[in-house]
């Protein structure tokens, strides 16, 4: 069964980047993955002054609106690095928060899909043909955490021998 998620208040809303789960990355706190992701668009760009403003945004919706403003200039390599930036933040989110890590792990091997009606890159788009990169990242993070848990159990058993 495929698991669809999108808005925070809908089922599996904790998989959304807008969910209220803060992360620390390189010594800086971000109140959602969306805040971090939108700010990274402007690292080393002429519009980098926007970064602390995005970080201080009251809501992820506000952070997204600031980051999506078409009059500002994104870093030149954004299209190349954005998937890696997102994966790093999503992994940090699920390593930080045990409650939602459990929810992610209980999805087993189900396909996860961001059911965005407008986003054909991160989500599946209105007609379900989108690339679903956020769902793919979540599935790969799920696998990485599973492997981490497994190696922790194995080393705990080894230590007790
Ligand atoms: N508008 C909106 N509302 C939500 O509740 C969402 N989860 C999303 N999707 C997220 O938007 C981000 C992509 O932003 P850019 O288009 O690259 O600026 C990404 O985090 C999606 O998961 N959108």
Image: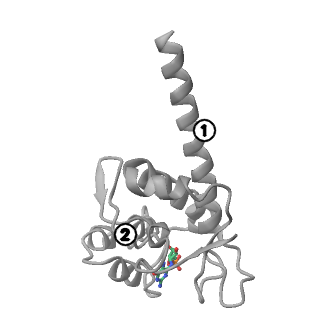
**Front-most of 131 and 95?**
95
Residue 89, above or below 129: above
Distance (Cα) linking label 1 and label 2? 28 Å
Instruction: Give the label on residue 147, or none.
Output: 1
**Front-most of 109 and 33?**
109
- Left or right of 63 on screen, residue 136: right
Residue in the picture at 55% in, 37% down = 148
- Left or right of 2 on screen, residue 151: left
- Left or right of 96 on screen, residue 5: right
The location of residue 74, given as percent across then percent down, is 49, 73
Q: Secondary structure at mark 1?
A: helix
**Front-most of 25 and 69?**
25
The location of residue 121, given as percent across then percent down, is 64, 76
Residue that sits furthest to the top in the current view: 161
Could one spot residue 79 in this view of the protein?
no
Question: In front of the other: label 1 or label 2?
Answer: 1
Residue 141, above or below 158: below
Q: Earlier in the sequence, mark 1 or mark 2?
A: 2
Residue in the picture at 75% in, 82% down = 129
**Front-most of 156 and 123?**
156
Instruction: Give the label on residue 87, or none.
Output: none
* Residue that mark 2 sits on: 35
Residue 23, above or below 147: below
The location of residue 136, given as percent across then percent down, is 65, 63
Q: Quadrant of residue 137?
A: bottom right
Residue in the picture at 48% in, 58% down = 103
Residue 82, above or below 118: above
Residue in the picture at 46% in, 77% down = 73
């Amino acid at each position: 069964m495929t698991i669809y998620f999108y808005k925070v208040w809908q089922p599996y809303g904790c998989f959304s980047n807008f969910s209220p789960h803060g992360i620390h990355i390189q010594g800086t706190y971000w109140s959602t993955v969306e805040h971090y992701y939108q700010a990274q668009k402007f690292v080393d760009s002429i519009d980098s002054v926007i970064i602390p403003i995005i970080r201080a945004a009251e809501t992820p919706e506000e952070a997204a609106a600031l980051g999506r403003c078409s009059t500002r200039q994104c870093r030149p390599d954004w299209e190349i690095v954005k998937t890696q930036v997102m994966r790093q933040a999503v992994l940090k989110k699920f390593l930080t928060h045990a409650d939602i890590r459990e929810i992610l792990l209980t999805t087993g091997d189900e396909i996860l899909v961001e059911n965005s009606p407008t986003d054909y890159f991160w989500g599946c788009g209105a007609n379900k043909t989108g690339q679903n990169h956020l769902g793919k990242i979540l599935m790969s993070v799920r696998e990485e955490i599973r492997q981490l848990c497994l190696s922790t159990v194995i080393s705990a058993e080894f230590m007790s021998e």
